[in-house]
Amino acid sequence: MRLLMWFFRLLLFFLLFGFAVKNDHLVSLQFFFGSAWQLPLVFVILVAFTAGALLGVTATFGSLLRQRREIGRLRRQLARAERDRQASPSVTPPSAPEMQAPETF
């Protein structure tokens, strides 16, 4: 399996490298007030991809932190409930009602 993963990585690298070699033409980026940059097309694509990936990571990061805080709060609540249950063993949790199988005729 490892060998297969390395093969796919190598294949992806060569595909992207070939893409970069084929798209080495200069493009002109026009900005405000008449300023312009001349950059290779592959560099512009790489910057756009990197910016999109960073935007996606930052969008996910907020929800990840919120979930971690909630997990910590729930763990503390569970530990507190277990301590309370051990402190007063006379309280028994309610049992589920017994289910009976239907009669067959």
Image: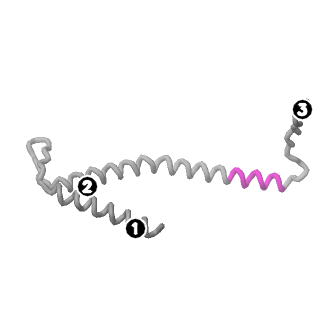
Q: CA distance from mark 1 to mark 3?
A: 60 Å
Give the number of the mark in front: 1 or 3.
3
Hey, which residue is sitting farthest left in the picture? 34
Hey, which residue is sitting farthest top in the picture? 105
Secondary structure character of the magenta stretch overall: helix
The three-letter code of the residue at mark 3 reads Thr
Hey, which residue is sitting farthest bottom in the picture? 3
> Residue 14, how many percent across, how many down?
28, 63
85 in magenta:
yes
Circle 1 sits on which residue?
A: 6
Residue at horizontal 89%, vertical 36%? Answer: 100
Determine crowd level at label 2: few under 14, some 14-19, many 20+ residues with C-alpha closer than 10 A.
few
Q: Secondary structure at mark 2?
A: helix
Labels 1 & 3 near each other (Cβ < 8 A) = no
The residue segment tinted magenta is 76-86
Circle 3 sits on which residue?
A: 104
Circle 2 sits on which residue?
A: 46
The three-letter code of the residue at mark 2 reads Leu
The three-letter code of the residue at mark 1 reads Trp
Q: Quadrant of the image for the C terminus?
A: top right
45 is higher (above) or lower (below) than 18: above
Between residue 73 and residue 102, name the one nearer to us: 102
Residue at horizontal 25%, vertical 55%? Answer: 46
User: In the figure, residue 82 lies in which quadrant?
Assistant: bottom right
Q: Secondary structure at mark 1?
A: helix
Q: Secondary structure at mark 3?
A: loop
Give the number of the mark in front: 2 or 1.
1
Q: CA distance from mark 3 to mark 2?
A: 69 Å
> Residue 11, how many percent across, how many down?
33, 63
